Image (cartoon, rainbow, N blue to C red):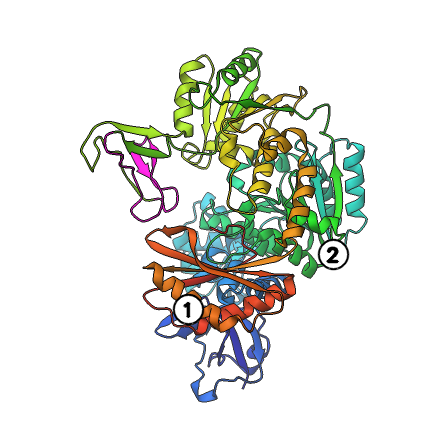
């Protein structure tokens, strides 16, 4: 008897065997394809499973096997290559395969809804209806009219009947008589057509030629270009070639809601035939985009990280823009890297993948320098633009207003008076990071985290930026009942108040996750700033993610020191990337522009490197430091975390795990911990971690499988949860 091996969305890291549904014939069972959905009994619940294979036998005794209840798909909906990618990812990241395979489907199909082919609802004659003569149903004029229309036109869209005043009730009457039946009209084919491209400079032309030389087979490429060097134009011309070959292109961007200009540029160049996938769409929109990608109706698919699991009918090109961005790494649940999976998918699909950035991640740069990736460099800005000059402002002993020195305030005023725009970067939203009582020293703390509550004065709220807990802003100290409450530190709301007071003649736009609410908020801002009129942009990292503001002539980092000191070994890399990306917003349309970094540590080596060296030089120096320390990308990391109601439970679990695995680990692997996480308590749970270092990916994978297998066998007491993070970005 054939056995159906299914992946079921549960926390269990295994596949499950079932017998085929009783109603299926032998021929139907033989025709089953991996990726088909089935409804099954799982414990006391009914769940949806995904067929991985039809096996000849099972390790489970036949008497213990259950029958699957129902087959939901007669054919597999995801592409076989996407299923292969999902199973590979489940093994690499040690995550339950059922939860990974879910990502190959849009949300509606994950819940067991029937698959609806794309297209418009329509009606057609049944076999019996096709046998009726002209003029039939004369006693029912409206039915006769509908029948005549079907006899003339084959399948007819429901909208046509409505325009003629024929209601759905009339059509249902024909259906009840067996004369008509429902169907779906396939959507009209829409092909993305490339408009004329821009003239390429020598670096851009060399990059396009070098990448196209291997088109049609697997190859990975790093496109490293300074900010404003025209990487997007390279993408567009490569996509145009892809479409000319009849292939599809998949483009991953960090956060689609923050890059309206990128989408607009794609639509301007290619018109129709573009599908967009991201979490801000409703279920119907996501389903339509998924179908357009899967069926090949969309030549270009643009999406955030989960779009890497979207099926394509004719994959030819995968692009990961701003590949260094941490948004490509899922930080909870299934902790995958969309950038790394893009490379693996290109290998499976036998197609080309491009990783683009002005500040490539050290992992990507390492692969390029080792010759694993093609390396294409754009050293100059496109057109006549020049890179901005960068200078530091020593704010020691200076009076600051809204975090700004007199020198910075004067630079802002001069720039605005000259008709230019100003961008001010402050990576702390809210009004102030701390509320303190001046009388007794009380500080507002989150009740669920080891963190202070941030003051949001506009909302009259205290909010935790780790667990999102909030409470009303008090008027008196809850400890001593004094009324002298002070705000310490700086946030974007506070700086905005000062800017509006001192620069009232010019618009001030605050850009953070509090102010940019709603799907159209960022687009509205981009449209207004795009007029080029003088204004001030004040914001957080939102302003660094691929935006093109040609009118910005001055960029200033209000508190560069907030990035300077980090316990994370990636701290210097992240600072260099962020400051380079911020600086890159200046002078993108002609004038070189200026970048000012306010700091209390102008002589710090990292600050001096930022002032004197390009990111490319800094990155190569950091790579050498990583090589000497054996840290990624010259070594590998695994992180096993626990969340528990008390600190001792998590540390005891990890201690027991360490004792079980330490003698079985591959040579060269080292264990660090168990230790409390840097932020030990979060959302009411105590967090502990066990870190594993490995010399290479092969040893890291063996260690990951061992850790996951042994952790699964250990009892998880008192509601403890554990997770494993392969190639972690965040060690907190």
- Is residue 553 toward the left or the right of residue 230 in the image? left
**Quadrant housing residue 584:** top right
Q: Are marks 2 and 1 in contact (CB under 8 Å)?
A: no
Q: How many marks?
A: 2
Q: Is residue 442 magenta?
A: yes
Q: Residues within 10 Å of mark 1 (few under 14, many from 20)?
A: some
Quadrant containing the N terminus in the rendered view: bottom right
Q: Secondary structure at mark 1?
A: strand
Q: Which residues make up the magenta segment?
A: 439-468
Q: What is the x, y in percent for residue 551?
A: 59, 21
Is residue 227 within the magenta segment? no
Which residue is denoted by mark 2 in the rendering? 218
Q: Residue at x 51, y 64 (%)?
A: 95
* 21 relative to 551 in the view: left or right: left
**Mark 2 or mark 1, whichever is nearer to me:** 2
Q: Which mark is residue 47?
A: 1
Relative image position of residue 32 (x, y in whole percent): 57, 74
Pick the front one: 111 or 459: 459
The CA distance from mark 2 to mark 1 is: 37 Å
Residue drawn at 40 percent across, 59 percent down:
173
């Amino acid at each position: 008897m054939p056995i159906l091996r299914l992946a079921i969305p549960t926390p269990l890291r295994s596949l499950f065997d079932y017998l085929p549904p009783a109603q299926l014939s032998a021929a139907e069972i033989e025709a089953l394809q991996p990726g088909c959905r089935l409804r099954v009994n799982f414990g006391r619940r009914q769940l949806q499973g995904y067929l991985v294979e039809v096996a000849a036998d099972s390790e489970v005794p036949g008497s213990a096997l259950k029958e699957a209840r129902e087959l939901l798909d007669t054919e597999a909906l995801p592409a076989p290559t996407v299923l292969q990618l999902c199973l590979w990812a489940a093994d690499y990241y040690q995550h339950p395969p059922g939860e990974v395979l879910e990502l190959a489907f849009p949300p509606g199909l994950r819940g067991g809804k029937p698959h609806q082919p794309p297209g418009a609802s329509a009606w057609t004659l049944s076999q019996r209806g096709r046998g009726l003569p002209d003029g039939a149903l004369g006693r029912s004029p409206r039915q006769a009219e509908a029948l005549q229309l079907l006899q003339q036109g084959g399948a007819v869209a429901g909208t046509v009947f409505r325009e003629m005043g024929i209601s759905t009730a009339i059509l249902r009457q024909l259906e009840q008589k067996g004369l008509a039946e429902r169907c779906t009209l396939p959507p009209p084919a829409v092909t993305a057509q490339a408009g004329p491209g821009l003239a390429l400079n020598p670096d851009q032309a060399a990059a396009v030629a070098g990448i196209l030389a291997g088109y049609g087979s697997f190859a990975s490429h790093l496109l490293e270009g300074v900010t404003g060097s025209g990487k997007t134009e390279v993408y567009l011309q490569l996509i145009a070639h892809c479409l000319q070959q009849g292939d599809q292109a998949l483009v991953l961007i960090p956060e689609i809601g923050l890059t309206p200009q990128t989408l607009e540029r794609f639509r301007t160049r290619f018109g129709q035939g573009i599908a967009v996938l991201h979490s801000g769409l409703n279920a119907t929109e996501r389903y339509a985009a998924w179908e357009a990608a899967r069926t090949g109706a969309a030549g270009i698919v643009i999406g955030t990280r989960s779009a890497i699991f979207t099926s394509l009918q004719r994959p030819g090109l995968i692009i990961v823009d701003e590949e260094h961005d941490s948004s490509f790494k899922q930080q909870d649940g299934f902790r995958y890297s969309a950038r790394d999976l893009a490379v693996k998918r290109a290998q499976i699909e036998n197609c080309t993948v491009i990783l683009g950035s002005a500040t490539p991640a050290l992992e990507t740069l390492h692969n390029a320098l080792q010759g694993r990736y093609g390396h294409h460099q754009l050293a100059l800005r496109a057109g006549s633009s020049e890179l901005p000059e960068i200078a530091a402002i020593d704010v020691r002993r200076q009076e600051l207003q809204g975090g700004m020195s007199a020198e910075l305030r004067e630079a802002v005023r001069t720039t605005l008076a000259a008709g230019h725009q100003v961008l001010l970067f402050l990576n702390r939203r809210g009004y102030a990071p701390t509320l303190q009582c001046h009388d007794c020293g009380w500080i507002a703390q989150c009740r669920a985290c080891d963190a202070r509550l941030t003051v949001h004065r506009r909302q009259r709220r205290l909010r935790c930026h780790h667990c999102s807990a909030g409470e009303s802003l008090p008027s008196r100290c809850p400890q001593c009942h004094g009324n002298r409450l002070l705000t310490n530190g700086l946030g974007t709301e506070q700086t905005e108040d000062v800017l509006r007071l001192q620069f009232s003649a010019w618009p001030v736009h605050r850009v953070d996750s509090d102010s940019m609410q709603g799907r159209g908020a960022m687009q509205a801002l981009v449209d207004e700033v795009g007029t080029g009129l003088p204004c001030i942009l004040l914001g957080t990292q939102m302003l660094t993610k691929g935006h093109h503001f040609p009118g910005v002539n001055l960029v200033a980092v209000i508190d560069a020191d907030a990035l300077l000191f980090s316990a994370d070994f990636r701290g210097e890399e992240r600072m260099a990337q962020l400051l380079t990306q911020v600086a890159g917003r200046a002078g993108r349309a002609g004038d070189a522009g200026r970048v000012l970094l306010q700091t209390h540590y102008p002589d710090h080596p990292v600050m001096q490197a930022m002032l004197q060296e390009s990111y490319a030089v800094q990155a190569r120096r950091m790579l050498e430091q990583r090589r000497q320390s054996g840290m990624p990308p010259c070594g590998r990391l695994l992180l096993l975390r626990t969340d528990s109601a008390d600190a001792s439970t998590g540390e005891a679990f990890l201690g027991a795990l360490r004792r079980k695995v330490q003698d079985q680990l591959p040579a060269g692997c080292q264990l660090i911990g168990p230790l409390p996480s840097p932020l030990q308590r979060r959302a009411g749970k105590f967090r502990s971690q066990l870190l594993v270092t490995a010399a290479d990916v092969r040893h890291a994978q063996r260690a990951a499988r061992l850790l996951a297998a042994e952790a699964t066998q250990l009892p998880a007491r008192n509601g403890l949860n554990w997770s494993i993070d392969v190639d972690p970005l965040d060690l907190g």
